[in-house]
Image: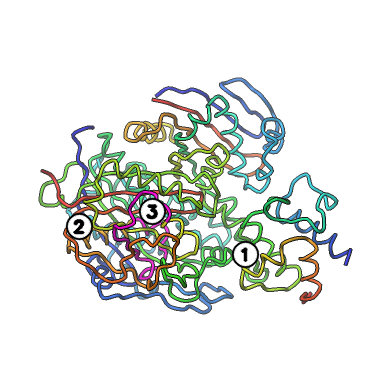
Amino acid sequence: MKTLAHVRITPTDTSVNGATVSSASLAGLYREFAGDYPKFFKMDSLCKLGFMAAELCLKNLSADEKENTAVILFNRNGSLVTDRNYQKTIESDNYFPSPALFVYTLANIVTGEIAIRHKIYGETSFYVLDSRDETLMDEIVSDTLLTSSPRYILTGFVEYENEQNYIADIKLVTK
Amino acid sequence: MGGIVITKIADNIISPLGTSTDENFRAICNGNSMLRGHSGAFGLPEDFCGSLFNRNELESRINTEIANSETFTFFEKLCIFSAKKAIEDCRLSACEADVLFILSTTKGNVEYLAESATDERCFLAGSAKKIAEYFKNTNPPLVVSNACISGVCAQIAAVRALLSGRYRHAIVIGCDVLSKFIVSGFQSFKALSPEPCKPYDKERIGLNLGEAAGTIILSATADNEKAQWQYIAGAIHNDANHISGPSRTGEGAFRVILDILKEISTDEIAFINTHGTSTAYNDEMESIALHRAQLDDVPVTGLKGNYGHTLGAAGIIETILSMKAVDNKLVLPTKGFENSGTSYPVNVSAETRTTDKTAFIKILSGFGGSNAGIAYRKGGLQ
Amino acid sequence: MDNLILQLKNQIIEVLNLEDMTADDIATDAPLFGEGLGLDSIDALELIVLLEREYGIKLSNPAEGKQIFSSVASIADFVSKNRKK
């Protein structure tokens, strides 16, 4: 398995292939590196994080190359932050369930947001693990490369807890 | 990996219609459903129609069948109960290092979010670990969290793990229980039908939710006796269109079907068991995808009129019932369907039909623009 | 009416996360969906919640929304006739 690009985003540092490119927040990264996709602001934080990581990681792939790329992401807490936010909209004394929050109470939506942005029609999968187990993640990704058709896989760990704690550690790999 | 043949060696379904695959299959053949109107359930201010467990009764029964039941939530108990039945059925030693547990669920224990400071229970992999540990299995379990298509994706993940040679058996459990969280969300999407749903029908107005658990055990080294069903192909594709609305061209589902048809000929297919949720857009989208794949004549069946949409369990239980149907040379009826209401009048099977064909395709679509499909053929190792 | 229109614009910007927009950027008669602000089906559902929470108006049939949500002017007209709070 060969790594073609590697992006790491934390609250204080964003790096591409090991070199720091920014220290901005997620919204700051959007203004710096995207800027043409207002739907970004409708996303939940997990999606914003995955979206920006994909934005930086897929820069050198052509539209044709992207079409059958697979997106396989992992984390530990699923969509827990948005789950909590949605839960607040269904408390009995203030019951106004929010569809815009509910749709993000599924961790795989981040893979869908990336697919929509980059016109990726390949596999999108999200796995929730008990810990950030690099060996296990690599096994799943190499099994996928071995047994299905994608030439490229955008993969990695993407987890959002709060403004001070989040990480996207994403790479673009090929056979 | 070329020589490895993946077969199904055991299965189980726990639903409001029964606690074994046979009970469930008989119920479907008899046209049964537990879709009922529920008022005040889960503290919801709005009524809804769904297929719910009699929780107290089932939980007391499970408590007598599994050890240390007080340490598990209802969701976890259901997973363990279902897996236990399947494991006993094929006499698998589930604690071995070559056995992998895979859990398919959308929201697991999310009902506990309502109680503060118990977030820990809402970690899906925490549940999966407890379930695997119940069977003394120490491999890190996988949780496939791909919304409504998780049940098929979990089977595909199992196949990959087996083909890699890393594991010899995979225990794939699919389960979701309903809660205020889940039902209110679908209500806010105006996606629910107040009456039992009518897949592909002219008068369909929405889906029903349902509760279920199911287990499929796949093996790379089955003996001839147990290996009655062989995995043929599986595929996952995104619509790249919208996070909640199905594609108007059925793009992802179409690509899934095309991938599968590379491995199986249309003549072999007894039926396609579709998602068939009974929402205006899903059923229309599937009819377009089937038409584009030139499958207009292949019988289509859907089980949502019996179970509602069982979320993470759907892909598992609908696959198992498809196998049972072919075992009995039947195409199952699509409960609720009367008059075709899609742009392309796919061949929806309203009544039970007979078939001599021995393969089927199961497809699903869901939030996130995701689509998945899997095909199995009857007949084990040659 | 002008107050209601301004209030609605601000509420729409807030609940739909229309970043970098102010009430002045939304023309009262311009279409909200498709061409105009480019809102989509989830936005429409969220506007239904807005009507219920802020004005006590319950829309049970989302199809009704199509007409009502065609512009800020049409929402304001509907709200002023049907509001319960």
Q: What residue sits 44% from the left and 35% below the top?
A: A68
Instruction: Specify which label sits upstream in the sequence, 3 or 2.
Output: 2
**Part of the protein shown in magenta:** B288-315
Image disc number at residue B291: 3
Q: What residue sits 72% from the left and 73% below the top?
A: C57
Image disc number at residue B88: 2
Q: Mark 2 lies on which chain?
A: B
| Place of residue A114 in the rendered image (x, y in percent of width and height, measured from the top left) | 55, 40
Taking the magenta stretch, the answer to whether it contains residue B296 is yes
Q: Observer-nearest residue: B229 or B145?
A: B229
Going by the image, does A13 lie left or right of B313? right
Q: Is residue B233 above or below residue A1?
A: below
Q: In this view, does B310 lie above or below B254?
A: below
Name which residue type carries label 1. Pro
Label 3 crowding class (10 Å Cα cut-off): few <14, some 14-19, many 20+? some
Q: Is residue A95 above or below residue A157?
A: below
Q: Do the residues labelled 3 and 2 touch (CB within 8 Å)?
A: no
- The type of colouring in the image is rainbow
Distance between the alpha carbons at the discs numbered 1 and 3: 37 Å
| Place of residue A50 in the rendered image (x, y in percent of width and height, measured from the top left) | 57, 38
Going by the image, does B146 lie left or right of B7? right
